[in-house]
Amino acid sequence: YFIQSNLRNRLMGVSSSSSSGGAGVANAALVGSPHSGIPVDPVPYTGPAIEYRVIQVEGTVSASFDGSASSNIDDKMPLLAQQYAEYFQLGTFFRLPYQASRKGMMSARVAYQGIFLRPAVFVPSPESWQLQVHQTTLSLNDLTHGSVFGMRSLNTAPNAAGLTNIFNIVGAQADLGGRLLCVESTCSRNRTGFVSMDFGVNLFFNMPLHPNPQKFTTIAFCTSMQVARSFGHVSCNWDINGPLAGYLNQGWKLVDINLPQHEAGLTQQGNKRNHMSLVPLQLSVIWFFEKDQARIAANDMTPLYQVTVVNVDVHVSVGFTGSSSNLNITSLIKEMGDKGWSVVSVLDTPAAQQTGMMAMKCTVSVFFQRPLVAAPPPYMGAPPQEMGAAGAPPLPPGVLPSGAEEYTAAPDPTKS
């Protein structure tokens, strides 16, 4: 079935002569996945700390012989929505990469995680929200070059028409005060033609329950990711700082980042087709940002947020009944939450390195965001205080305050 096949194809895409095992991988999840260093604040962050709650649910993906697939996790949505009763709000929802087990000839069980957050110290707010989920499709053009049977590249890109369904839903919810939280793959996909494919996505929204909510505008744009393959290694080259700097410096807030081709499984197929080729594969990265409509109308460009990314190493093992990974970012998000960072996106990237015959190490990029807080002025010491009544001018030398008597020490009889 297609999930297990894609995982094996991904291993073929990073094939090498190494035969070392993956000993110790299973226990790594107990202490959290290794990751790159977290940012160090020159001065302690004075904004609110964030408390996290992670909810994991399972779903089933069913595949067909024509390459299409379908999934449904609607019955898990009430559990996610219940977290709002305790003032948690969804930060992101994603499928755990490479967590799949066979559930029949043409189906598999996969795992999802919802990461919820709230201020560590409760602050009463007139705002109240509820979680809503809308299902739709994102269209991709599966355009191949060269011989049909000897494909040297796989170029797929979302076009304006492919994003129409998403923008129609986002716009309708924005008119009601709704705010997009994340765009996540449902694992569903359907080939609509010889060179085109649709794959299902869930759009998660915060919908207001309070009157007169602020309204936000959401924008999306695409950048490219270059993927290069060599024996035993897949590397990714993409510009992160450019898009973030361009929009954060104009007062926008990052909402989500999406790799549609990779989430749809097309990257893994591409790896199989090109595992003997070093031709780079170009993928589309879709960035979502939002901004208060009132600030847009006022042409307010004041930056309000900062973003950072932490790369997490994920060890993957593939067997005949499925695959498993040791992704565990619970300790990471707690440490980041103590410094005020809110998780925005958990992005599985194509970057990988083979560590055994049926094992590899992959990279997951976790994006965090927090409000900018103005640093307090340096402490210069207490100002000098004048003696006298509060608010009164200083008294002239030799003049006592009203009601005070001059004190004169008595003479010392032991001294002449």
Image: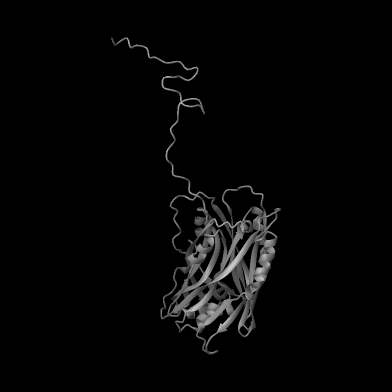
What residue is drawn where x is 70% and y is 55%?
A: 209
Is 248 situated above or below 120?
below
Number of numbered discs: 0
Report whether 211 appears left or right of 372.
Answer: right
What residue is drawn where x is 44% and y is 70%?
A: 23
Report whether 59 appears left or right of 149.
Answer: right
**Residue 415 lies in what quarter of the image?**
top left
Q: In which quarter of the image is the N terminus?
A: bottom right
Q: How is the structure coloured here?
A: one colour
List x then y, in percent, for residue 332: 50, 59
List x then y, in percent, for residue 127: 66, 52
List x then y, in percent, for residue 192: 65, 82
**Residue 408 lies in what quarter of the image?**
top left
Which sits in the foreground, 301 or 23? Answer: 301
Report whether 80 appears left or right of 144.
Answer: right
Q: Quadrant of the C terminus?
A: top left
Is 37 situated above or below 269?
above
Is 87 situated above or below 30?
above
Which sits in the foreground, 396 or 47? Answer: 396
Asked if one can make out residue 209 in the rendered structure from this viewpoint, the answer is yes
List x then y, in percent, for residue 261: 56, 75
Which sits in the foreground, 360 or 156? Answer: 156
Asked if one can make out residue 114 in the rendered structure from this viewpoint, the answer is no
